[in-house]
């Protein structure tokens, strides 16, 4: 079983990251503010182009430690790679499946079924915990999504599958505002807005998804799969289509729940967000740090994997799903088992 390691997130504009013996060191204004053993870090994620010493970059390239650059809002900018060690035969099989709609559908159907099922789980779990909050609306949305699950499992084309996915997303996001229980009415959610996010809840969601897809991308690369070539998301230059495919299973569990907890537990306030003239809502440093802290804590929690029946940290889930997908692509298992909340 792969060991769960940490991700080092660098958010300060003045940060400098270097290697000192067998440790990673972060300095701000020539003062050491963080130090960790190299063997405990799996990825370094920089928000903005922070300075990283050449020696550290060389070490990361040689030892499969990922270095990613994201904008301050979480948009992917670049990733530093060492020599590619992926299995070329595995990737060749992956490309063949991607070119075959029937085989792609065999992977995409269970992924979307898991995504919708996990959305329903989040709604119903919240309803159990807060039975007095709009039960009819939430139950109706969950019921409609349940009915569409049967159609998803029988979809005959990727276009049909994407249509059912879109319907379920509209149902889910149509009631997501009811899960925001923080008093005061400062946080609202009318609909999903991405580029740009038009309210604080959407800004938190977009940032969480960006962090999550980077973790999934790293996991796919680790097992030798090409994160650019997916089965549900179409090929597009610069888009990590396969990472977006696998992330669908984790949106509710590792994205939406964190957003809701940050708002409902008042770990962020409306003052942590700025509305630009264009209508775009931007997060403050405090909001970014609060989300990253919550995300890291979430990854440390333990769960029993629903397919493997083994206990593991939540942070390992993207790696486990990447391994299971690689096994299917190689022909070691008959179908890909996605991640279901139970």
Image: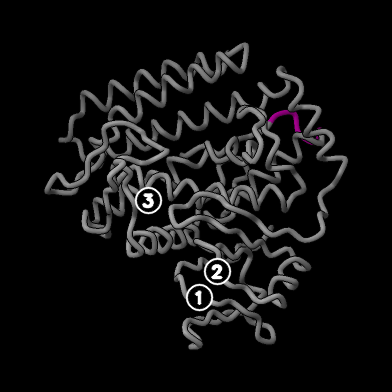
Mark 1 or 3: in front is 1
Between discs 1 and 2, the one toward the N terminus: 1
Q: Position of residue 107 (x, y in %)?
A: 66, 27
Q: Position of residue 195 (x, y in %)?
A: 42, 38
Real-space CA distance between mark 1 and mark 3, rounded to the nearest whole angstrom: 26 Å
Residue range highlighted in magenta = 331-335
Q: Residue at x 50, y 75 (%)?
A: 15
Asked which secondary structure carries label 1, the reply is: strand
Asked which secondary structure carries label 3, the reply is: helix
The residue under label 2 is 50
Real-space CA distance between mark 3 and mark 2, rounded to the nearest whole angstrom: 26 Å
Whether 158 is drawn above or below 42: the answer is above
Q: Position of residue 104 (x, y in %)?
A: 69, 24
The dominant secondary structure in magenta is loop
Classify mark 2: residues with Cα within 10 Å, few (<14), some (14-19) or many (20+).
some
Indicate yes or no whether the magenta region holds residue 87: no
The residue under label 3 is 258
Q: Residue at x 64, y 41 (%)?
A: 238
Classify mark 3: residues with Cα within 10 Å, few (<14), some (14-19) or many (20+).
many
Q: Are marks 1 and 2 in contact (CB under 8 Å)?
A: yes
Real-space CA distance between mark 1 and mark 2, rounded to the nearest whole angstrom: 6 Å
Indicate the quadrant where residue 96 lies: top right
Q: Position of residue 254 (x, y in %)?
A: 45, 48
Q: Nearer the viewer, residue 153 or 104?
A: 104
Q: Nearer the viewer, residue 35 or 331?
A: 35
The residue under label 1 is 15
């Amino acid at each position: 079983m792969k060991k769960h390691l940490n991700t080092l997130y660098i958010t300060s504009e003045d940060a400098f990251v270097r290697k000192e013996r067998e440790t990673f060191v972060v300095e701000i204004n020539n003062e050491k503010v963080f130090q960790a053993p190299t063997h405990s870090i799996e990825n370094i994620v920089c928000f903005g182009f922070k300075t990283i010493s050449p020696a550290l970059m060389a070490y990361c390239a040689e030892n499969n430690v990922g270095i990613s650059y994201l904008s301050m809002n979480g948009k992917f900018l670049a990733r530093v790679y060492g020599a590619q060690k992926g299995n070329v035969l595995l990737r060749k099989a992956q490309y063949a499946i991607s070119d075959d709609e029937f085989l792609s559908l065999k992977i995409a159907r269970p992924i979307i079924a898991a995504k919708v099922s996990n959305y329903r789980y989040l709604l119903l779990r919240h309803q159990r915990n807060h039975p007095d909050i709009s039960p009819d609306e939430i139950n109706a949305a969950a019921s409609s999504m349940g009915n569409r699950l049967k159609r998803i499992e029988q979809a005959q084309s990727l276009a049909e599958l994407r249509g059912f996915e879109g319907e379920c997303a509209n149902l889910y996001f149509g009631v997501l505002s009811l899960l925001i229980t923080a008093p005061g009415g400062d946080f609202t959610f009318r609909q999903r807005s991405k580029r740009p996010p038009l309210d604080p809840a959407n800004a938190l969601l977009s940032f969480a998804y960006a962090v999550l897809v980077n973790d999934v991308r790293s996991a796919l690369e680790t097992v030798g799969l090409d994160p650019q070539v997916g089965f549900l998301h179409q090929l597009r230059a610069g888009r990590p289509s396969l990472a977006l495919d696998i992330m669908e299973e984790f949106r509710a569990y590792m994205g939406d729940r964190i957003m809701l907890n940050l708002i409902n537990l008042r770990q962020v306030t409306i003052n942590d967000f700025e509305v630009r003239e264009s209508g775009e809502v931007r997060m403050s440093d405090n909001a970014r740090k609060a989300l990253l802290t919550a995300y890291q804590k979430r990854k440390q929690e333990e769960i029993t994997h629903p397919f493997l029946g083994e206990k593991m940290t939540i942070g390992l889930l993207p790696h486990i799903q990447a391994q299971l997908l690689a096994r299917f692509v190689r022909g070691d298992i008959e179908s890909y088992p996605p991640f279901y909340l139970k």
